[in-house]
């Protein structure tokens, strides 16, 4: 059971307050060094496919590895929505990061409009078609309609969707969509839910710790 906290563009809590927690932390770039120094398993929120070059605003796998960063998110729905990320660039970032020795959490999921049109499986099939199994690859299913909205897929819906994803790509799948301490147990009890990508709740130490403790109680 893997729990990852995505701090997005927030400074986040004191990394020392999370010391000893069995979780991945994805802070903004300015906090990477602090999180690594605190002994946290630290992932970046994005990584470029080239090892270096004229790519202003991007960060490469070698630069992250130099800091002691262990992995990266790739293709988060906000990257797709606001910054033009495509399935093809997600694939390039994922392959480059894995080849360089980083672990990757690659994000997939449908928008509210796609869900309303009954296109969830088609969207997931397209997004997954560019990815390949890898020992260091984990997926995060992010129903975009449940990110930052307070809405959460029911445990049954999450299980059904995760099982579909695994039928296409046999790697662990995290659930990411308004995971909180009070809904984590129901989600984690599902056979094909292998953990969570936690957004807002990861910014509150007590809430995030409670989610991690819930995950730790689930039999492996």
Image (tube, helix red, strand yellow):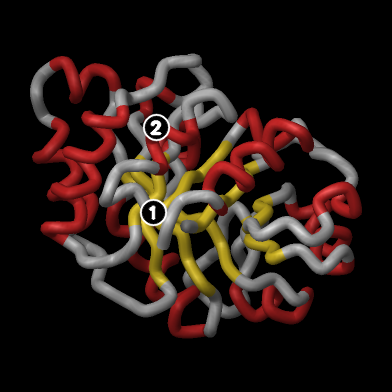
Q: Where is residue 28 in the image (x, y as percent from the top left)?
A: 73, 48
- Which residue lies under the disc numbered 1? 194
x 12%, y 58%: residue: 167
- Label 2 neighbour load within 10 Å: few <14, some 14-19, many 20+: few
**Mark pair 1, 2: CA separation:** 12 Å
Using the image, determine if residue 33 lies above or below residue 53: above
Instruction: Please name which of the two marks, 1 or 2, marks the residue nearer to the observer.
Output: 2
Q: Position of residue 210 (x, y in %)?
A: 66, 37
- Label 1 neighbour load within 10 Å: few <14, some 14-19, many 20+: many
x 55%, y 76%: residue: 102
Q: Nearer the viewer, residue 147 or 63?
A: 147
Compared across the picture, whether 54 is left or right of 27 comes to: left
x 62%, y 46%: residue: 212
Q: What element carries label 1?
A: loop
x 46%, y 59%: residue: 105
Of labels 1 and 2, earlier in sequence is 2
Give the numbered dot on residue 186.
Answer: 2
Compared across the picture, whether 35 is left or right of 58 comes to: right
Using the image, determine if residue 69 lies above or below residue 8: below
Residue 77 image-quadrant placement: top left
Q: Where is residue 205 in the image (x, y as percent from the top left)?
A: 78, 37
Q: What element carries label 2?
A: helix
Compared across the picture, whether 73 is left or right of 23 comes to: left
């Amino acid at each position: 059971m893997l729990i990852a906290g995505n701090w997005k563009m927030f400074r986040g809590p004191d990394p020392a307050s999370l010391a000893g927690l069995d979780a991945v932390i994805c802070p903004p770039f300015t906090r990477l060094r602090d999180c690594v120094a605190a002994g946290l398993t630290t992932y970046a929120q994005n990584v470029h496919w080239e090892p270096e070059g004229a790519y202003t605003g991007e960060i490469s796998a070698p630069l992250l590895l130099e800091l002691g960063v262990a992995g990266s998110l790739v293709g988060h729905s906000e990257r797709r929505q606001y910054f033009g990320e495509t399935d093809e660039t997600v694939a390039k970032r994922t392959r480059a990061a894995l080849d360089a020795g980083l672990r990757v959490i690659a994000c997939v999921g449908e928008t509210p409009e796609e869900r309303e049109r009954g296109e969830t499986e088609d969207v997931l099939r397209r997004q997954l078609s560019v990815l390949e199994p890898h020992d260091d690859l984990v997926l995060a299913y992010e129903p975009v309609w449940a990110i930052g909205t307070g809405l959460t897929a029911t445990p049954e819906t999450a299980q059904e969707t995760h099982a579909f994803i695994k039928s296409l790509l046999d790697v662990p799948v995290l659930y990411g969509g308004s995971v909180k301490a009070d809904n984590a147990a129901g989600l984690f009890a599902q056979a094909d839910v292998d953990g969570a990508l936690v957004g807002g709740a990861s910014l509150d130490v007590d809430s995030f710790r409670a989610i991690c403790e819930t995950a730790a109680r689930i039999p492996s």
